[in-house]
Amino acid sequence: MRRKEFLIVSKLNELTIRSALEGLKKRDFKSEDLVNGCLEQIKKYDTQIHAFLKVVEDQALEKAREADVEIVTKGDTAFIEKPLLGIPYAAKDNYSTKNITTTAASKVLENYVPPFDATAIKKLNDAGAILLGKTNLDAFAHGSSTETSDFGTSYNPWDLSRVPGGSSGGSAAAVAAHMCLFAVGSETGGSTRGPASWCGVTGVKPSYGRVSRYGIVAMASSTDSPGPLTKSVEDSALVLKVMAGKDPFDATSSPAAVPDYLHEAESYDLRGVKIGRPVSFFEMDLEEGTKQKVNEAVEIFKNLGAEIIDVDMLSPKYSIAVYTILQRSEVSSNLARLDGIRYGNDRVSFGFEAKKRMMLGAYTLSAGYYDAYYAKAQKVRTLIKENFDEVFRKVDLLIAPSMPCVALPVGESAKSPMFGEMMDVLNEPACIAGVPGVSVPCGFDEGLPVGVQIMSKMNEEQKIFGALLKFQKATNFHLEKPALIKEQ
Ligand code: GLN
């Protein structure tokens, strides 16, 4: 009996949010069991994966016990007031967390303890979710592998000799390794969809302004978009509903009403929906296995009743130049505040990647070069945005690969100074235009997950969720687990 109980409890960390909520409501288990399951998984695997920079074990257990009391005293009403009550999650270490170090994986902020929570964290905590700890990233979110982290790289749970992607690599690896029920990441130019694709999880880059940026260590403010990484589309819909909304502390946050994403997604009818297939995205240098799996996903959508239409769009290659210039320019301005005077360590603590980006940005913004680089990049950005507006007059959604290849071996990023931009070439256009995109697993190539993404016009995430919910109901790719995790 004890053994059986142990087996059941030790698997709780593998639940989706939706099934965990059902179990909590039925009192099949307690939030404390869920949290313990995740903590055990972290202890078991994180020495190899290194998804976490910090685990707040005592705080998480205390919050779980509080949640359990709330469930007992209030019953189902507790979940109406707090839709994520008792659900353990992990946050990328660029989300400010009150009284918990927030380093952005940089030595500059090594000892920085924020006196406040980022708005997204506050909303999640207010909704009853329980923070387990902070996850690794490329320092200041600069990169696509976690290898620029000043605290060591993270490893891909599907193959420990490979990177999980980045910059939200720790968050994606933690979800893939079932160390938490969900995680939050942030995307400026691919940093959520990329690692979600490489780790075989669902990753959401919401519309720009959909989720408040307040309290998230600023990278490129005009594209930074925080969002969830989960085990299913349903779970992403649940978490985004909590994270999204107007925030008086972020003037760029959208005042648009937040839909009940899951409810709308469940009633979304894919039949007759026009999904554009941007030919230029498929003409990029894609690995054969990736191309094949994404083409198969396109067929699945066709079989589910969607109408697939080839559309002409600007080549994503233009986004590389635009993204690189805008991102560097905004980085040089945002990181200037880390001067070692008000908080954080001295500027000498900046890593190579951040220094490189700041110097380039100072150049593209300087008198004499501003017009040639920054102003020109902004003009091309407008063209890219108009290109999306135009295509969304013809189709409802867009489908494309999330990444050009499967997860790369550790060490690969050091070979190219433009690694981050090249890897995220298929994600940058949506970031530049501000439109949302969600990546889900759509198959495996040589045992590694491949991701496909669906994009929509601004603030139509519910349609993306609707289409992908049908996809996940018809397929099992999102249910696969890394071999490492299966060996119990
Ligand atoms: N590849 C992008 C970069 O290196 C990823 C950044 C991001 O989205 N945070 O800049």
Image: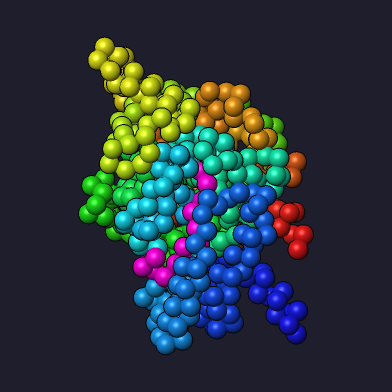
Which quarter of the rendered picture does the N terminus lie within? bottom right
Left or right, residue 325 beside residue 414: left
Residue 84 visible in rendering: no
Query: Where does the image place residue 373, in percent across and percent down from the top left?
Result: 33, 18
* Above or below for 341 versus 88: above
Magenta segment: does it hold 239? no
Q: Range of the magenta residues?
A: 125-137
* Above or below for 372 versus 393: above
Residue 198: quadrant of the picture? top right
Q: Could you say which is closer to the camera, residue 287 or residue 14?
A: 14
Residue 128 visible in rendering: yes
Residue at the image point whose x is 62% and y is 59% from the top? 42
Query: Where does the image place residue 166, in percent across and percent down from the top left?
Result: 53, 40
Residue at the image point whose x is 67% and y is 49% from the top? 48
Residue at the image point whose x is 35% and y is 61% from the top? 122
Residue at the image point whose x is 71% and y is 45% from the top? 159
Which quarter of the rendered picture does the C terminus lie within? bottom right
Left or right, residue 6 beside residue 191: right
* Above or below for 140 versus 99: above
Query: Where does the image place residue 109, in percent across and percent down from the top left?
Result: 40, 43
